[in-house]
Amino acid sequence: MNILEYTFFQNALLGSFLASILCGLIGTYIVTRRLVFISGGITHASFGGIGLGVVLGISPILSAMGFSILSAFGVQWMSHRGDVREDSAIAVFWTFGMSLGIICCFLSPGFMPDLPSFLFGSILTIGETDLWLLGTLVVLVAVVFVLLYRTILSVAFDANFARSQRLPVDFIEYLMMALIAMTIVATLRMVGIVLSISLLTIPQMTANTLTHDFKRIIAWSIVIGWVDCLLGLSLSYSLNVPSGASIIFVSILVYLVAKVGRVLHNQSKRKIETK
């Protein structure tokens, strides 16, 4: 328990809580809207923004956020064109971002000490700036969901029907793509580019084994996501392994346990009904 006295661990706990709220909201939309592959493309495209930040001498997080938002808009625009398939548009920005990031990192003078933390994550390196970024995004996303909840829900489940009801589908899609991009960049410190998309999908998949209600999935995703982070941090501290990988490893185990429990519950329920 002595580790709780250290500031870096307190920041990790607070950061994991804020990230769980943020990913619970945004991740539920991603899973419901089936945007997992698009989000993966945005995640890897953000590496181009990190590389630009290194070369230009500005904050890699800010440059990655701007680059990711533009990439998200580009994927959204290209995928709605009749001559470009969605997976092709994702591949373009995915590979462009990764190649640009690699080129910029090799062109940057000196060694980039934070590169492993961006690629693989290290929640214990979260500072006050990262906490402020997470906190600001949590407030922003929460306000958007409160004000536009019904429209977001309609677009998430059936965009074509929402468009027939004269709802602002295009505005919501671009707005949510921007929020997805910002959420991905804000969580890079925790789990890195390689594993970031997992934090936005696995807790939601686990929550979906418990309920199919959109609001309840959000609530359960927040709780499950934070539990995953706490257990992952404990595993990381015990085995002295990277925290990002530990969090995702634990979240997958929790999902498997929930899935098996759901299957066993359904089987026992059917046995009772047959009797």
Image (cartoon, grey):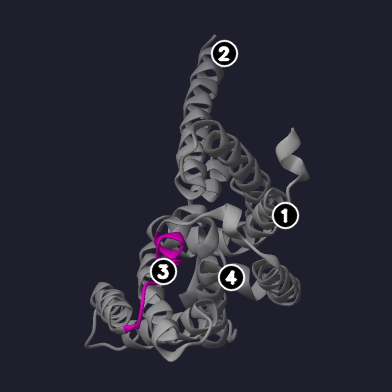
Determine crowd level at label 1: few under 14, some 14-19, many 20+ residues with C-alpha closer than 10 A. some
Residue that carries the numbered disc 4 in the rendered image: 154
- The residue type indicated by label 1 comes to Leu
Q: Residue 83, relative to residue 110: is it above or below?
A: below
Q: Which residues are magenta?
A: 108-119
Give whichever of discs 2 and 1 has the lower sequence position: 1
Q: Residues within 10 Å of mark 3 (few under 14, many from 20)?
A: many
45 left or right of 30 in image = left
CB under 8 Å between discs 2 and 4: no
Q: Which residue is mark 3?
A: 43
Please state the total of marks drawn on the protein image.
4
Tell me where residue 185 appears, x and y as whole percent.
51, 71
Q: Position of residue 36 (x, y in %)?
A: 41, 62
Kindly tell me whether residue 263 is visible in this rendering: yes
Residue mark closest to the camera, 1 vs 3: 1
Q: Who comes first in sequence, dot 4 or dot 3? A: 3
User: What residue sits right under mark 1 in the picture?
Assistant: 14
